[in-house]
DNA sequence: GTCTATATCAAGATAGAC
DNA sequence: GTCTATCTTGATATAGAC
């Protein structure tokens, strides 16, 4: 049953968004699936293997983004990039990359390396979109698109954290404020 | 020896900035101090007690900030607010509040409540400074100072995470970019 | 091949020694 | 009052049952 493997990855991905990488356990996966922890270990021998699979999925999604929207304008790609993120997160979820970044010092070396790659790729994908926007005159020519990418992503991730803790929805206003500043 | 208690708090505070709240253990505290875990439990019966003490310290520091700089201009207070943060963080440290926010779902209720208070207070302190700056004409009158506070803090915290993972120093450029946008 | 029973280790926490 | 020896639990991981 290869579907079980997918189930585990999906569940683990959600748990990372909710509890963080260090905080979630194999029992958190086993219980809802109605199996024992050891069964999870069959599919993913070590927690690191599961972490790597998830980080790889994140990396692939980022790599595919520019391919999926190759025929779209830069403005459309920016909108998609942001919309997809907004849709993905509920009230009790934070960015999975934020979780992995926070737990960075506890991660095994190979997973650390993968988290680095994902972090770099996420910045690069957004920076590319912003650079295209600059070419199209939608952004001031003096803008540092790389710094802007850091700024936008950091901001979005931070807001998710505040939202969850404070139980409020500041994303919309904040987004308006950010757009007003940048564009 | 009441100094031992202080030592523990200092150490735990650093560990939260490095590893996160869930990830650090009483053994991480005991080893460098040359005592057993149980000894730490004497000073802080439960991990939650230690967490609460640290969160309280963060809250007090925030409450004192406007008092310490009551006679300063809004611009000076903003500079101080940011400078103190920049000075506090090394290459392998992230914002302690970010750590507690990421681990939020794993925290005992009382500590969750305290993390909420710290989060609110941090936003409020910065928003107050920005509101004063608006009164002094240093900020566009249309600015939403509350949203700006979220934006600035989120951004700063996010950057610390990227910096640590990528081993780079993007804070300076990013800060320049942010200042250019906001002020 | 897929899973359970079990081992091992480290976590947080208690009770009792100095 | 301060700490150590010890307990209990829950974590990751292995070896072996179906």
Image: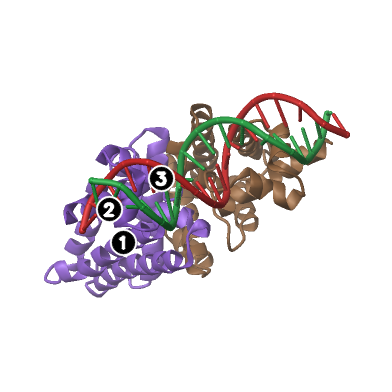
Chain colours: A brown, B purple, C green, D red
First in sequence, mark 3 or 2: give its number. Answer: 2
Mark 1 residue element: helix
Q: Chain of mark 1?
A: B
Kindly check if marks 2 and 1 are in contact, taking CB atoms under 8 A apart as contact. yes
Residue matched to label 3 = B24
Q: Is residue B117 left or right of residue A167?
A: left
Mark 2 residue element: helix
Residue located at (72% from left, 43% from top): A36
Q: Quadrant of the N terminus of chain B?
A: bottom left
Mark 3 residue element: loop
Residue A162, percent from left and from top: 46, 62
Relative to residue B133, is residue B34 depicted above or below?
above
Mark pair 3, 2: CA separation: 13 Å
Q: Is residue B83 visible?
A: no
Residue B163, percent from left and from top: 38, 39
Residue located at (29% from left, 61% from top): B58
Neighbourhood count class around disc 3 (C-alpha, 10 Å): few under 14, some 14–19, many 20 upward: some
Mark pair 2, 1: CA separation: 8 Å
B41 and B125: which one is in front? Answer: B41
Q: Is residue A19 left or right of residue A39?
A: left
Relative to residue A4, is residue B49 depicted above or below?
below
B142 and A168: which one is in front? Answer: A168
Residue matched to label 1 = B53
Can marks 3 and 2 be said to lie on one chain?
yes
Residue matched to label 2 = B9
Q: Quadrant of the C terminus of chain B?
A: bottom left
First in sequence, mark 3 or 1: give its number. Answer: 3
């Amino acid at each position: 049953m290869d579907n079980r493997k997918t189930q585990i990855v999906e569940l683990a991905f959600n748990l990372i968004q909710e509890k963080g990488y260090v905080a979630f356990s194999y029992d958190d996966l086993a219980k809802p699936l109605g199996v024992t922890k050891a069964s999870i270990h069959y599919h993913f021998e070590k927690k690191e293997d599961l972490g790597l699979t998830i980080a790889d999925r994140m990396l692939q999604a980022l790599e595919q983004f520019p391919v999926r929207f190759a025929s779209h304008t830069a403005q459309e790609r920016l909108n998609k990039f942001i919309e997809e993120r907004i849709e993905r997160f509920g009230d009790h979820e934070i960015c999975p990359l934020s979780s992995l970044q926070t737990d960075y010092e506890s991660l095994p070396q190979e997973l650390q390396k993968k988290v680095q790659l994902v972090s770099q790729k996420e910045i690069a994908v957004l920076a590319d979109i912003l650079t295209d926007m600059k070419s199209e005159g939608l952004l001031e020519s003096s803008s540092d698109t790389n710094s802007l990418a850091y700024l936008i992503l950091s901001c979005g991730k931070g807001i998710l954290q505040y939202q969850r803790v404070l139980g409020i929805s500041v994303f919309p206003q904040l987004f308006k404020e950010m757009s007003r500043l940048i564009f």
